[in-house]
Image: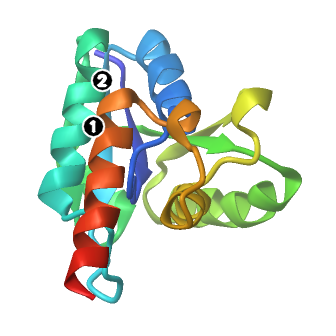
Amino acid sequence: MRRAVCPGSFDPITNGHLDIIERASKLYDVVHVAVAINRNKQGMFTIEERIALIEETTAQYGNIVVESHLGLLVDFCRERDIPAIVKGLRAVSDFDYELQMAQMNHGLTGVETLFLPTSPTYSFLSSTLVKEVASYGGDVSHLLPETVHRRLVERIAERRAQQ
């Protein structure tokens, strides 16, 4: 069985993330989506909310397993016998950093990294940018799955009400 992992923070999952996950799901029998836990960052969504949103938006692919992970991605891969990491590249600047990570990961455990170029439609897209634009009232509905967009708008309203 061919297995790979698509790692990220997914705070929130965007259409760019889904583009990479969908394409990976066509190349591998099982794709693990590993939601990174970063204890030093306060996310817009909890890890559990992110997992639920990813599960909902990837259900149609039929071969996606969504889990959180803390620590080194190569340890996540080793524990699950996953030989490949799939990463999307938006720009040349992504490649510089991701190449170093890929070489380190391969050197640590032999896990391979497959780079997929992001669709030009999403080459500028990041969760951080989406959250910033949405927080100022900008329309990001075309950049997110409908359910994720709705939850993002609700979360921004909740946070404003608390201030």
The amino acid sitting under disc 1 is Ile
Q: Is residue 91 above or below residue 145?
A: below
The residue that appears at 72% across and 66% down in the rendered structure is 97
Side (left or right) of 87 relative to 157: right
* Percent of width and height locating residue 111: 47, 47
The residue that appears at 87% across and 53% down in the rendered structure is 92
Answer whether residue 118 is visible to the viewer in this image. Answer: no
Q: Is residue 155 above or below residue 90?
A: below
Residue identified by numbered label 1: 54
Q: How many marks?
A: 2
* Percent of width and height locating residue 115: 66, 38
Mark 2, residues whose alpha carbon is within 10 Å: few (<14), some, or many (≥20)? some
Side (left or right) of 52 relative to 71: left
Mark 1–mark 2 CB contact (< 8 Å): yes
Q: Quadrant of residue 142?
A: top right
Residue identified by numbered label 2: 58
Most distant residue in the right direction: 92
What kind of colouring is applied to the model shown? rainbow
Measured in 3D between alpha carbons, the distance from the residue under mark 1 to the one under mark 2, in whole angstroms, is 6 Å
Which sits in the foreground, 132 or 38? 132
* Percent of width and height locating residue 146: 37, 29
Label 2 SS: helix
Q: Quadrant of residue 61?
A: top left
Side (left or right) of 53 relative to 142: left
Q: Quadrant of the C terminus?
A: bottom left
- The tag on residue 21 is none
The amino acid sitting under disc 2 is Thr
Answer whether residue 55 is visible to the viewer in this image. Answer: yes
